[in-house]
Image (cartoon, grey):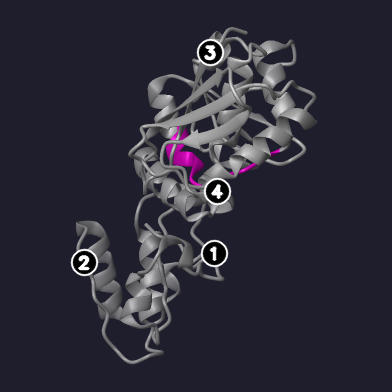
Amino acid sequence: MGSISLARVFTRALYGMEAPLVTVEVCLAAGLPAFTVVGMPQAGVREARDRVRSAIQASEFNFPRGSKITVNLAPADLPKHGARYDLAIAMGILAADGQLSESSVVSREFYGELTLNGELRGVEGMLPALLACRREGREAVIPLDNLAEAQVIREQQCVVGESLRDVVEHLSGPHRLPPVKPVAETSYVYPGGDLADVIGQEQAKRALVLAAMGGHHLLFVGPPGTGKTMLAQRLLGLLPPLSDEEGLEVAAVRSVAGYEHRAATPQSWLQRSMRAPHHSCSAAALVGGGSVKSHNRCKNPEIDATN
């Protein structure tokens, strides 16, 4: 290795519903041994230094101890949160050290948190990143924990790995990771009930049908227990399933919210959903507020769904 060795690896950040491209630039230079991460990294990203070092060593790869390692997460003006950059940083170090060829990483994007023994953990908000990766025509390398989200996308180039060693062998060895296959579509009946089950309420049922046919807004007013929520749940049974584009958008919202287990089945991501807040819910609780990390998720995942 010369005095300076560079490598570039691609990944993506999570910025609301968007997944902006992040270029992980790794520089190995002569000098006092150090490991520095720059590019507006938050605490979880800065801690990647210890996770990546331990994961590389536990996976029986060479960690460049005698080099000054600088990792730049570009663009520098975009805040970086979480541990989703661990795998990309590890790939950049191995490529800069010559243990991986640059051609094997330049056409791929890497996602995942590394444990100290080199295993891969899933990260939140994977679906928007996979959609953006597909538009760029790159192959996505993701943890096995995010397999269900990847199976939502029909046309894709994506592989899953369980550890850092799995990913390295996929890039350089004969042990290739199998591509992710989308799940088969199945018919689905909304479990909220049929409008025919409602006895009486003829005027309200007529209003539901008209609202569903014309795409109109609808407001039910009345005291608790008169059937407002029951009727609103039946409205979904009158509407057609979401289109592929609409379904992926809804699934991406659930993915960002951390509901990967619900974002991944065609029965859920193509079916319209609703919120049913309690009648005692305050305006602040209904709209939400505060920091993202302080939001309390609903205990009932069947109710806490957005469309």
Please indicate whether residue 120 sits to the left or right of residue 207 in the image. right
Which residue is the site of mark 3? 4
Q: Nearer the viewer, mark 2 or mark 1?
A: 1
Name the quarter where the N terminus is drawn.
top right
The residue depicted at 32 percent of the width and 71 percent of the height is 287
Mark 1–mark 3 CB contact (< 8 Å): no
Mark carried by residue 217: 2
Q: Position of residue 192 (x, y in %)?
A: 48, 67
Q: Position of residue 97 (x, y in %)?
A: 63, 15
Q: Which one is nearer the viewer's eye here, 266 or 156?
A: 156
The answer to whether residue 126 is above or below residue 165 is: below
What type is the residue that disc 3 sits on?
Ile
Mark carried by residue 301: 1
Between marks 1 and 3, how big is the CA–CA gap? 51 Å
Q: Callout 1: helix, strand or loop? A: loop
Between marks 2 and 4, how big is the CA–CA gap? 43 Å
How busy is the neighbourhood of tag 2: few (under 14 within 10 Å), some, or many (20 plus)?
Answer: few
Mark 2–mark 1 CB contact (< 8 Å): no
Q: Is residue 121 magenta?
A: yes
Q: Position of residue 68 (x, y in %)?
A: 58, 25
Q: Position of residue 290 (x, y in %)?
A: 37, 68
Q: How many marks?
A: 4
Query: Which corner quadrant of the image does residue 56 belong to?
Result: top right
**Residue stretch rendered in magenta on the structure:** 120-130
Q: Earlier in the sequence, mark 2 or mark 3?
A: 3
Between marks 2 and 3, how big is the CA–CA gap? 63 Å
Q: Nearer the viewer, mark 4 or mark 1?
A: 4
Which residue is the site of mark 4? 44
Mark 4–mark 1 CB contact (< 8 Å): no
Query: Which corner quadrant of the image does residue 283 belong to?
Result: bottom left
